[in-house]
């Protein structure tokens, strides 16, 4: 477990109004980040983007003030997908990018993610440096050195063109009918343009944000509405993003869900068939064992990273591979972008459909998912479950029951006070029973 005070697996996140997700903290965070990102001898600038939750206005202003106090210029992007901020941070040659978002969480949560000048998540050392500055008193630089703020009005158009540039010029969706679920989030004003400009007939749900409805019964964490819309409209498929647009899940024409593991398999298999996979595939500890078995059967290398796209990216860079992802729909396609991007990932799936001449249902048939059960146990404070003897003993007992035909994984969530209990194997009833038994041990251990 990390000893960092504020940063979790994916930035800083919590409930609005509760420490650290307060205006006062965001002011200090902006200043601390400005100090950490500043480079002497140059005019430093930081981009700020946000999703559609109402608290974004408040935190945007606080971060802007803190950065200006540190002598850093601010470029405001407004509501934009997380990967758009990563892309624009690179193209503007900015010192860093900041995203105000709690991703798939409800409106009463919010958080902060940072991007490096290269458009990648920060490494641990830089996050720790920001935390060191947070412990220091805020000192405003001289008036003549204060940062200035400006708004980037053409940010959506820039990002739309970038997304389209990640597929070949001849690629078109003229014969495809698609339903998009934008989760009332950051993709609402850009995703429909991308797919329509590529020729698709597009209908949209979850495209009317009001500041409070982000992820509310819509988006990649709630697919019921999209499933109904796809079937009722006779669409070829549905595409669901989360609130900040870095994840994507799909719905097949018959209304069946296609998760991130299956989408990763579809992209990898098609690229491999064309001879353009460029190495192996990185999944996580949570990736379904069926993915690993199906890829290895084709001769595709597979490696597991810790949960979190930053760890997937670390292994991709280390191996010089191009493709990795998580079952949640968070995929990293390194030869297209520098971070998880829901729109770009969806386009890669559609490209695989186009090149193969097969439907999504046909492409996903090559992989059989093993039954997997996940139980989330809410705790007062995150901790390493395997550091407790009673929990570790229960895990060893469960692993001996499953043998080589299954897996057991317990881990602390990096974004919520949860212990995640996952079991996987060939007998659905058995793995469900084992997961419930382990969850009960965790609950009793923390009572």
Image (spheres, helix red, strand yellow):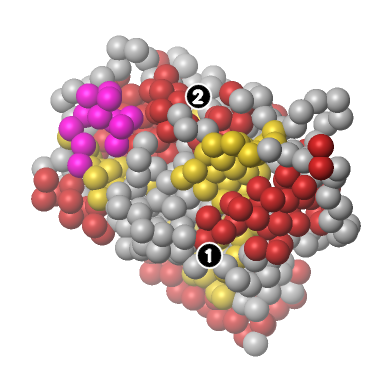
Q: Is residue 197 magenta?
A: yes
What is the spatial separation of the Cα atoms under label 2 and label 1, in whole angstroms?
30 Å
x then y, percent, for residue 126 = 79, 43
Q: Is residue 289 above or below residue 439?
A: above
Q: Is residue 266 visible?
A: no
Quarter of the image with the C terminus is bottom right
In the image, 84 versus 4, the foreground residue is: 84
Mark 1 highlights which residue?
A: 109
Mark 2 highlights which residue?
A: 336
| Residue visible at 52% across and 33% down in the picture | 152
| Residue visible at 16% across and 40% down in the picture | 235
Instruction: Answer left or right for 197 relative to 29.
Output: left
Q: Is residue 445 visible?
A: yes
In the image, 285 versus 415, the foreground residue is: 415
Range shown magenta: 192-203
Q: Is residue 210 magenta?
A: no
Q: Please state the total of marks drawn on the protein image.
A: 2
Q: Residues within 10 Å of mark 2 (few under 14, many from 20)?
A: some
Give the mark nearer the N terminus: 2 vs 1: 1
Instruction: Indicate the secondary structure of the residue bearing disc 2.
Output: loop
Instruction: Indicate the secondary structure of the residue bearing disc 1.
Output: strand
x then y, percent, for residue 414 = 63, 59
Q: Is residue 374 above or below residue 360?
A: below
């Amino acid at each position: 477990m990390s000893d960092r005070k504020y940063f979790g697996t994916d930035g800083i996140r919590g409930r609005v109004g509760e420490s650290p997700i307060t205006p006062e903290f965001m002011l200090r965070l902006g200043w601390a980040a400005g100090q950490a990102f500043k480079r002497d001898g140059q005019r430093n600038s930081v981009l700020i983007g946000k999703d559609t939750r109402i608290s974004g206005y408040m935190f945007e202003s606080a971060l802007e003030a803190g950065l200006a106090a540190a002598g850093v210029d601010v470029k405001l992007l407004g509501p934009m997908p997380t990967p758009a901020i990563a892309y624009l941070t690179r193209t503007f040659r900015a010192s860093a990018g900041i995203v105000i978002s709690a991703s798939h969480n409800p409106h009463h949560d919010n958080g902060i993610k940072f991007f490096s000048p290269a458009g990648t998540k920060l490494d641990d050392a830089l996050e720790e440096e920001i935390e060191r500055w947070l412990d220091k008193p805020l000192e405003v630089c001289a008036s003549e050195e204060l940062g200035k703020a400006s708004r980037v009005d053409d940010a959506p158009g820039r990002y739309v063109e970038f997304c389209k540039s990640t597929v070949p010029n001849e690629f078109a969706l003229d014969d495809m009918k698609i339903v998009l679920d934008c989760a009332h989030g950051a993709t609402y004003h850009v995703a429909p343009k991308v797919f329509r400009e590529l020729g698709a007939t597009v209908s949209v749900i979850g495209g009317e944000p009001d500041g409070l409805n982000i992820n509310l019964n819509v988006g990649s964490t709630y697919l019921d509405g999209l499933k109904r819309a796809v079937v009722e409209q006779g669409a070829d498929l549905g595409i669901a993003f989360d609130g900040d647009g870095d994840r994507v899940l799909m719905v097949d024409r018959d209304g069946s869900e296609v998760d991130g593991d299956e989408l990763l398999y579809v992209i990898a298999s098609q690229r491999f068939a064309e001879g353009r996979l460029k190495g192996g595939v990185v999944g996580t500890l949570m990736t379904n064992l069926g993915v690993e078995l199906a890829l290895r059967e084709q001769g595709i290398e597979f490696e597991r990273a810790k949960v979190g796209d930053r760890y997937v990216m670390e292994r991709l860079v280390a191996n010089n591979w191009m493709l990795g992802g998580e079952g949640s729909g968070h995929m990293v396609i390194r030869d297209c972008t520098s971070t998880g991007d829901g729109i770009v990932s969806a386009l890669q799936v559609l490209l695989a459909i186009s090149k193969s001449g097969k439907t999504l249902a046909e492409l996903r048939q090559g992989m059989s998912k093993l039954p997997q059960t996940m139980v989330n146990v809410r705790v007062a404070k995150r901790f390493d479950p395997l550091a407790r003897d009673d929990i570790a003993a229960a895990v060893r007992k469960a692993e001996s029951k499953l043998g080589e035909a299954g897996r057991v994984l317990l881990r602390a969530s990096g974004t919520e006070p949860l212990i995640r209990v996952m079991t996987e194997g060939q007998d659905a009833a058995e793995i469900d029973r084992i997961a419930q038994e382990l969850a009960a041990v965790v609950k009793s251990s923390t009572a």
